[in-house]
Image (cartoon, rainbow, N blue to C red):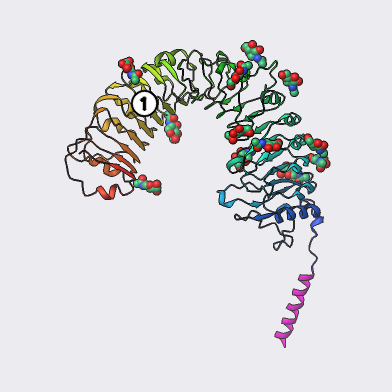
Amino acid sequence: MLVSLLCCFLFIATLKAQQQPQPAASDNTASPPSCIPHERDALLAFKHAVTSDPAGLLTSWRRDGGHGEQDCCRWRGVRCSNRTGHVHELRLRNTREEAAAMEGKISPSLLALDHLEHLDLSWNDLTGPSGRLPEFLGSLKNLSYLNLSSIPFYGGLPPQFGNLSRLQYLDLSNSNFRGDTNSTDLSWLTRLSSIQYLNLDLVNLSTVVDWHHVMNMLPSLRVLHLSDCSLASANQSLPHLNLTNLEELDASWNSFDHPMVTSWFWNITSLRYLYLHATSMYGQFPDALGDMTSLQVLDLSYNYNNDEKYRIMTTDLKNLCNLEVLNLDWALLYGDIAELFRNKLPRCSPNKLQELDLNSNQLTGMLPRWIGQLTSLVVLNLGWNNITGSLPPSIGQLTGLQTLDLSCNNLNGHVPYEIGMLSNLTDLDLHSNKLDGVITEEHLVSARSLKYIDLSYNALKIEINSDWQPPFRLDTAYFASCQMGPLFPSWLKWNVNITYLDISSAGIDDKLPQWFFDAFSNVRFMNISNN
Ligand SMILES: *[C@@H]1O[C@H](CO)[C@@H](O)[C@H](O)[C@H]1NC(C)=O
Ligand SMILES: *[C@@H]1O[C@H](CO)[C@@H](O)[C@H](O)[C@H]1NC(C)=O
Ligand SMILES: *[C@@H]1O[C@H](CO)[C@@H](O)[C@H](O)[C@H]1NC(C)=O
Ligand SMILES: *[C@@H]1O[C@H](CO)[C@@H](O)[C@H](O)[C@H]1NC(C)=O
Ligand SMILES: *[C@@H]1O[C@H](CO)[C@@H](O)[C@H](O)[C@H]1NC(C)=O
Ligand SMILES: *[C@@H]1O[C@H](CO)[C@@H](O)[C@H](O)[C@H]1NC(C)=O
Ligand SMILES: *[C@@H]1O[C@H](CO)[C@@H](O)[C@H](O)[C@H]1NC(C)=O
Ligand SMILES: *[C@@H]1O[C@H](CO)[C@@H](O)[C@H](O)[C@H]1NC(C)=O
Ligand SMILES: *[C@@H]1O[C@H](CO)[C@@H](O)[C@H](O)[C@H]1NC(C)=O
Ligand SMILES: *[C@@H]1O[C@H](CO)[C@@H](O)[C@H](O)[C@H]1NC(C)=O
Ligand SMILES: *[C@@H]1O[C@H](CO)[C@@H](O)[C@H](O)[C@H]1NC(C)=O
Ligand SMILES: *[C@@H]1O[C@H](CO)[C@@H](O)[C@H](O)[C@H]1NC(C)=O
């Protein structure tokens, strides 16, 4: 009886505890307001128009919730104002591969989210049956960020987007990996008075003749991407330049086909990043370039047209003390490389140049000794020119160097031991020169980062002790026509991850060692012929 009484008492106590009133959510001032019902309905209608969602971006979007998630402000990708509860942001970017893209269409129900400021649907396949960019998005007046990049729309850009007067970021790039977007009239852009970032990469603008004029009406612009837009020319003149805040301009992959000096953008001295890769511009580089002292990255590579006229570097870049990357690959330059280094490249202290690309030009002469003063260099790319003389020992001062490409030149003499001081070097390419002498362990003893080495087609002898264990693990080893034999070079056995190996014509007269197939089991390309 005592036991039953106790049980009874316990039962009542439990009941009482369950009846204790829970503190109401509304009493707690710190908790944010939950979502607004008609906005939740709009989001559910958006979800309804998405026919496929392999990455499950919208799985948490459910009316019944299940885990107390009928509060749409807590759904994935949804952000609400913690003051008003209105939906402010939809971040539904597909960050995975194409197979993870949502499919379907963008529901006009989004119009109910009239406080929306940030909309990112990039990399999803939400083109709908029409395939067109939805004009109605132009009515989301509060948008400051709109990202529809890499959604395969086709057809014209809707002028209704000109109503988005608060827009700061507009990204409509890369829509044509299946479709093809175009525009004949960009004048609606001039109504985007707050625009800072505009990306129209791959939108076909071939018929917009006044594009320079439109862009010049956007004085708040900081970043402008017009790569691969089929723009016909950039040689228009402007009476007055308004683009005084522009920091980044990418006009690569447009066939301008006129003299480089006639382009209109050389007066934009605020530019920090200028990409003009493959724009078919010819003739001298403009002198104004030497005054663009804010430049950090300058890419003028692959600039020539069908006439292929070689040019000498006349522009003095000496004052570009912020320059970190200078890419002049395939820029059809000729002349003396020492003169170019001495009189044209930045001579600043400290020198910030990290990457210098002069591949595939017609530069001649010898490398200057003071190259060692470019101490910030990480990438030095001078292959496919006609550089002569020897490799200066001062190269060993470039201790941050990761890539050194001097292939296909006319270098001669010995490889200096100082090259062994480049402990950060991952890629060393000296193939097809006239280098001679002997490469020993001493050349490689500090090269602990080396992954790629190509010494082929010189007159080099490689004499490395058979029991030397290198400090690096190569994935590419090209020693074609180097004298390595007569014994099989057994120091290679430590490089168990080699994928590309060429030791053809290396004077080896030996049996394949027992470790050969184990050590090189990952190889994808191998040439051991002519031994
Ligand atoms: C709202 O959130 C922001 C940042 O998320 C915070 O700085 C702000 O104090 C919050 N305001 C209120 C009223 O909770
Ligand atoms: C836009 O947002 C502001 C606050 O950021 C708000 O006061 C205004 O009502 C919103 N406009 C519309 C059309 O919803
Ligand atoms: C838009 O989205 C793409 C891809 O998701 C991203 O790379 C890009 O930086 C975004 N644009 C802006 C302005 O944030
Ligand atoms: C370009 O866009 C317009 C709509 O702005 C469209 O009428 C036209 O057919 C498009 N042209 C091409 C070549 O796609
Ligand atoms: C939006 O822009 C279009 C075309 O640019 C215009 O005809 C329309 O009246 C604008 N709508 C609103 C609500 O301002
Ligand atoms: C761009 O549009 C023009 C005119 O419609 C067309 O001739 C051209 O082929 C298009 N360019 C590309 C790269 O599709
Ligand atoms: C920009 O410059 C042009 C002259 O090229 C001028 O007509 C226009 O009013 C200016 N626009 C702005 C927004 O400053
Ligand atoms: C650009 O600069 C040159 C000389 O430095 C000057 O003659 C020209 O008027 C300027 N152009 C603009 C649009 O400011
Ligand atoms: C601009 O360049 C184009 C070639 O792209 C040429 O046909 C045109 O005559 C040039 N215009 C001026 C004003 O130099
Ligand atoms: C390279 O330079 C040497 C001597 O400076 C010259 O004899 C040779 O013809 C040049 N080779 C090429 C391909 O220009
Ligand atoms: C070499 O690389 C290491 C690690 O990446 C870095 O900390 C070091 O600063 C580099 N050395 C030079 C001289 O840049
Ligand atoms: C070989 O490569 C694999 C993957 O690329 C890596 O996980 C492994 O650590 C490497 N082995 C050596 C000895 O470097």
Q: What residue does disc 1 label?
A: 406
Frontmost residue, 511 versus 319: 511
Residue under the point 65% across and 25% down: 246
Quadrant of the picture in which ligand 9 is shown: top right
Above or below residue 345? Residue 459 is below
Residue 129: percent from left, percent from top: 68, 50
Instruction: Residue 343 in the image: state x and y as whole percent.
Output: 46, 12
Q: Residue at x 36, y 26 (%)?
A: 406
Q: Residues within 10 Å of mark 1 (few under 14, many from 20)?
A: many
In the image, taking residue 36 as reference, residue 249 lies left or right, namely left
* Residue 14 in magenta stretch: yes
The residue stretch that appears in magenta: 1-19
Question: Can you say whether 24 is above or below 466 in the image?
Answer: below
- What is the three-letter code of the residue carrying label 1? Leu
Q: Position of residue 51 (x, y in %)?
A: 66, 56
Q: Is residue 376 visible?
A: no
Secondary structure, mark 1, is loop
